[in-house]
Image (spheres, rainbow, N blue to C red):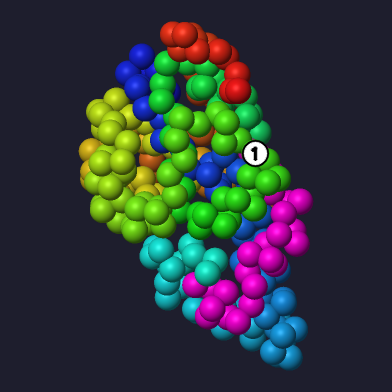
Amino acid sequence: MIDWDSIDTVLLDMDGTLLDLHFDNYFWLDHLPRLYAEKHGIPAADATATLHGRFDGRQGTLDWYSLDYWSAQLDMDVPALKREIRHMVALRPFALEFLQQLHAGPCEVVLVTNAHRKTLDIKMSQVDITPWFDRLVVSHDLQAPKEDPAFWHALQHLHPFNPDRTLLIDDTESVLESARQYGIAHLLTLLQPDSQHQKRIDTRFPGIHHFDEIMPGTLPRTGEAHSPT
């Protein structure tokens, strides 16, 4: 599926790609609505309907991914509530092995995430995969989410890459479409971002179930060790 000789740069999403999306779905769809219902003394169904309506209104924007924004909007310490269940953060199968293989090889490996910086810190305190990357890029730092073409232009300025020789792996189709329009030639999605949900069958981009399907070779980088310092 992937001709690794044609790839110089690998851009990797975090949630739903390297990490199981179950943590995020559980937090936003179950845990937070339950706590919101308790805070306001309303039925859980009403809390869920209220929050989902507010979430949908900001989907695809930086606000949608911002813990500070939702903390202010809901008058709740969202980062603290996430930390309460951080034990649920988990790597997807073969994600670590895939990162280690990439790190040992000649490709540049860059994390590109819409996750808020505080979210990144919470998750990396549980499963620290940062040593396996050449760079970590948070969309909030570039002032645009990955769904916005401005993100890719800003990324190019920050970390130059050849779109024709770049692979992006992401579980969100609107992100993949934005990357395709920018000119990134190699695009791949995940068929089961949330381990507790059914495998997707209607993706518009080529997909994999687990990373063992596309494991690269182990040719080391010149002058570099096989493991991070």
Tell me the magenta residue range: 69-92
Residue at which label 1 appears: 128
Residue 135 percent across, percent down from the top left: 45, 35
Residue 22 percent across, percent down from the top left: 65, 53
Residue 168 percent across, percent down from the top left: 39, 36
Q: Is residue 199 visible?
A: no
**Numbered disc 1: secondary structure:** loop
Q: Is residue 203 left or right of residue 84?
A: left
Query: At label 1, which amino acid type do we have?
Result: Asp
| Quadrant assignment, res 92 | top right
Residue drawn where x is 68% and y is 80% of the image? 36
Residue drawn where x is 72% and y is 77% of the image? 35
Q: Is residue 42 visible?
A: yes
Residue drawn where x is 25% and y is 29% of the image? 162
Q: Is residue 68 left or right of residue 85?
A: left
Task: For the N terminus, give its image quadrant.
Answer: top left
Inspect the magenta stretch and tell me whether residue 159 lies in it.
no
| Quadrant assignment, res 176 | top left
